[in-house]
Image (tube, rainbow, N blue to C red):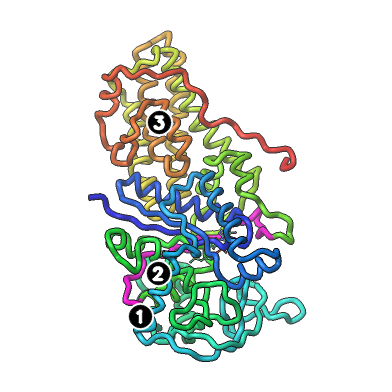
Amino acid sequence: MAEPYYLTTAIHYPNGKPHIGHAYETIAADVIARFQRQQGREVRFQTGTDEHGLKMAQKARDLDVTPRELADEMSGYFRELFDILNISYDRFIRTTDADHHRASQAIWQAMEAKGDLYLDRYEGWYSIRDEAYYDEKELVEGEGGQKLSPQGTPVEWTEEETWFFRLSNYAEPLLELLAKPGFIEPASRRNEMIAFVERGLQDLSVSRTSFDWGVKVPGDDAHVMYVWVDALTNYITGVGYPDGGEMWEKFWPADLHLIGKDIVRFHTIYWPAFLMSADLPLPKKVFGHGFLLNRGVKESKSAGNVTDPMELAETFGVDALRYFLMAEVTFGQDGSYSAEALVNKVNAELANSFGNLAQRTLSMIAKNMDGKLESFSTAADDKALLEKVGEACAEILPREFECLNFSVGIEAWLKAVYACNAYVDEQAPWALKKTDPERMKAVLQTLFIAIRDLAIAIQPVVPEKAGAVLDQLGIAGDRRNYADLADTAWFEGLAATGHTIDKPTPVFPRLELVQEEA
Ligand code: ME8
């Protein structure tokens, strides 16, 4: 039985078009989903849009449309982007979906039944941009003495009657949870959360009356739920809460909530507390990835440096973008990107190294061996190469990807690619063609085996391109998992079927820097 694996991204605010940070998080999640599937697990992968709240309501008002119209239009762009980026999600959830309203009301009722909700008056600071309440002592001073949230966003004084959640009751179990190794990763984000709880937890205002764009509070129609209550609930809506059933049994608790570092508090304090209150199991891991910066600078409309990820994918190709982001950025830390860096890295590592290796090898097999594979015996050099490639592809890369160390896994993979290229130069099959044609065949076919291993291993990162290489090699669609790397008889099997290699077309073209970027 395949072990189930449930992962989620944050759901994105569709108050504007998606930016590069949204693309980054979702690509990383897709790499994880594909990796786990390729490990033989039954994966459920959810992403979507977070459509309620004051931020959406205000933006819609500014644009003179209804929040629903704004959500429909912008959510469409997210979905389109994720389809272009080849994101293999199982559900794209929208918090305006009917089943989500039902799930949000159900968890509310469970928290109420526990005695954790009470009506009172809220007075305090609220940041619309963060959709977050802040204590006075958390605020920082901006230019001209303006009060700002710790994230640097404007806050406004809010007074209204709201429902409160007894967060203060959960300090002890939360501290126990936060201390659990592996619950928050990277571990560097843990201390800040522990400190937040240790400073003393205030009860949390969880409803609003000053606007009505949200999920109605059951039994109190004047209130809509605080947007984060409904947003976090998306993770359980998507697997069948509150009805339960097969999907719920299989996939909850989630294996991984993948989110950015700015929303770790919501996921490791508020969300577990809501779940504890509703007597539901807690997610196994919350990973807070870093932020993506444009040449080291945060993108913003005012800085005029906002990148459209759709445009990037169109200009450079989806797999080039995916590879760059996963190989370049140490996962968990902030990373920087620019068109030059992308073009340089992808040309050096994919086009000139892996792409060229596959193209040269398959062309030589097509030309010098009539494209026919045949059984051969390996020499010591061949064995050494295959061992090195096998170790990188079947051991190091999967081990590192399992821990979400993508750039480390890719680096090991790239070293194996370089080893293949060094082997081509040393063995010089073009010279062997005249001096020792049998040896030439052994060399080319050793490379054939290595390329298959390399293509299988890197599929989660560059699914389309690696798939195209595997198609050229003639590897069946159901023989492309990590477990297939352990099968030593596959090559003989393929050769015995009389499979032939056609003259290949290059899979990884060299990229050119577009004019205005140069
Ligand atoms: O926070 N680089 O939505 P959001 C990397 N709706 N990641 C970034 C980023 C950047 N420059 N900017 C944002 C929300 N992100 C809520 C989440 S979940 C129940 C509700 C990440 O559209 C950010 O950290 O502002 C978050 O994980 C995701 O993109 C969506 O951000």
Q: Which amino acid lies under the numbered mark 3 shown in the image of this protein? A: Leu
Write down the quadrant of residue 254 in the picture: bottom left
Q: Which amino acid lies under the numbered mark 1 shown in the image of this protein? A: Pro
Q: Is residue 349 above or below residue 5?
A: above
Instruction: Identify the residue shown where x is 39% and y is 40%.
Output: 457
Q: Which amino acid lies under the numbered mark 2 shown in the image of this protein? A: Ala
Secondary element under disc 3, as helix, strand or loop, is: helix
Of marks 1 and 3, which one's residue comes earlier in the chain? 1
Instruction: Tell me the distance, in whole angstroms, between the alpha carbons under discs 2 and 3.
Output: 43 Å
Secondary element under disc 2, as helix, strand or loop, is: helix
Does residue 64 appear to the left or right of 186 in the view shown?
right
Secondary element under disc 1, as helix, strand or loop, is: helix
Instruction: Tell me the distance, in whole angstroms, between the alpha carbons under discs 2 and 1.
Output: 24 Å
In the rendering, at what x and y percent does residue 515 appear? 73, 38
Q: Can residue 198 be seen by looking at this rendering?
A: no
Q: Can residue 241 be seen by looking at this rendering?
A: yes
The residue carrying pointer 2 sits among few (fewer than 14), some (14 to 19) or many (20 or more) residues within 10 Å by Cα, namely many
Q: Report the residue marked by disc 3.
A: 470
> Magenta segment range?
276-300
Q: Nearer the viewer, residue 130 or 446?
A: 130
Q: Report the residue marked by disc 1.
A: 173
In the rendering, at what x and y percent does residue 493 appear? 26, 24
Q: In this view, which residue lies farthest toward the right?
A: 144
Mark 2 touches mark 1? (CB < 8 Å): no
